[in-house]
Amino acid sequence: MTDTTFLKLGFSSCPNDTFIFGALANNFLESEPGFNVFIGDITELNQRAIQGELDIVKISAFAYLNIWQDYTILTTGGALGKGCGPIVVARQGKNPRELAGCKMAIPGKHTTAHFLLDFAGFHHGERIEMLFHQIMPSVKKGAIDAGVVIHEGRWTYHQFGLKQILDLGAFWEETTKLPLPLGVIAIKRRIDKKTMANVNSLIKKSIDYARKNSNKIWPFILKHAQEMDREIINRHIESFVNEYSLDLGNEGKEAIRELLNKACDKLKIQKPSLPLFWDDL
């Protein structure tokens, strides 16, 4: 059994995650268990989850296919929504077909953004993994032809003189009629269910604390943010911290199942055979 006195918690430096987990990371809540916090890029979080290094970890929804045997999914803290998915950007061009054979930057092969590029089906060229904040500058200077942009890049790409070629999130929503599951909170299956329930509740309390005490959370958000414009940070939080962050609900769970099923079909791999969500264990 895992020692649940302190659990290793990993989340990204993005404003939605630092908003959600800020109260827990800064011990603003009385919590049991306590948390040893790791903050990293989503690609690093995905990799650490694959290696089993973290007890609770924010990962790309698509990356869950690599860890489902060892982790289940909490129903709070995730990143799902509408109108907030990744986009494909380039210096020029009007439609995706013009980029079919181009050199495309992606924010990690295990990211949901990468799966959505496959799901859209237009790109067959070389793909280069980059940290998400390096993609737009690389496209701007011509080191790469186009890129899949995530996080606040959805609102700042024009500052780099780039054009949006395709909204991958909108493509998913139009095709499936479901919200887009970008990220989920995974917790090790070997942790007892009572502790899982407690962690799930603590994340919800952490969100509530951040909403009521923004002055205490903002310094933590700004300390880790890539984009310092407060308007952009607010848009980021408003887009990614929503009703699905508080509780996936039936629609959120359905969206995650749909994404994982479509990914398994495309990759021709085994679908998870264990319950996906902690409350179904």
Image (cartoon, rainbow, N blue to C red):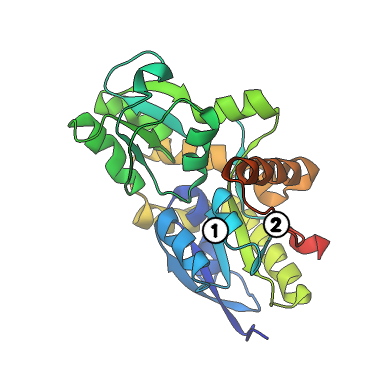
Residue situated in front as seen by the camera: 139 or 196: 139
In the image, residue 229 lies at what x, y percent? Answer: 34, 39
Query: From the image, which quarter does the N terminus lie in?
Result: bottom right
Label 2, residues with CA under 10 Å away: few <14, some 14-19, many ≥20: some
Helix, strand or loop at label 1? It is strand
In this picture, residue 172 sits left or right of residue 127:
right
- Residue, disc 1: 58
Outermost residue on the front side: it is 268
Q: CA distance from mark 1 to mark 2?
A: 19 Å
In the image, residue 33 lies at what x, y percent? Answer: 64, 79
1 and 2 marks in contact (CB < 8 Å): no
The quadrant holding residue 94 is top left
Q: Residue at x 75, y 42 (%)?
A: 254
Outermost residue on the top side: it is 94
In the image, residue 196 lies at what x, y percent? Answer: 72, 70
Q: Residue at x 63, y 46 (%)?
A: 264
In this picture, residue 129 sits left or right of residue 73:
left
Task: Give, as a three-letter code, the residue at label 2.
Answer: Pro
Q: Residue at x 64, y 84 (%)?
A: 2
Task: Give, as a three-letter code, the residue at label 1.
Answer: Lys
Q: Does the rendering let one see residue 5?
A: yes
Reply above or below: 129 against 46.
Answer: above
- Residue, disc 2: 272
Helix, strand or loop at label 2? It is loop
Residue situated in front as seen by the camera: 15 or 150: 150
Label 1, residues with CA under 10 Å away: few <14, some 14-19, many ≥20: many
Residue situated in front as seen by the camera: 142 or 154: 142
Query: From the image, which quarter does the C terminus lie in?
Result: bottom right
In this picture, residue 3 sits left or right of residue 250:
left
The quadrant holding residue 80 is top right
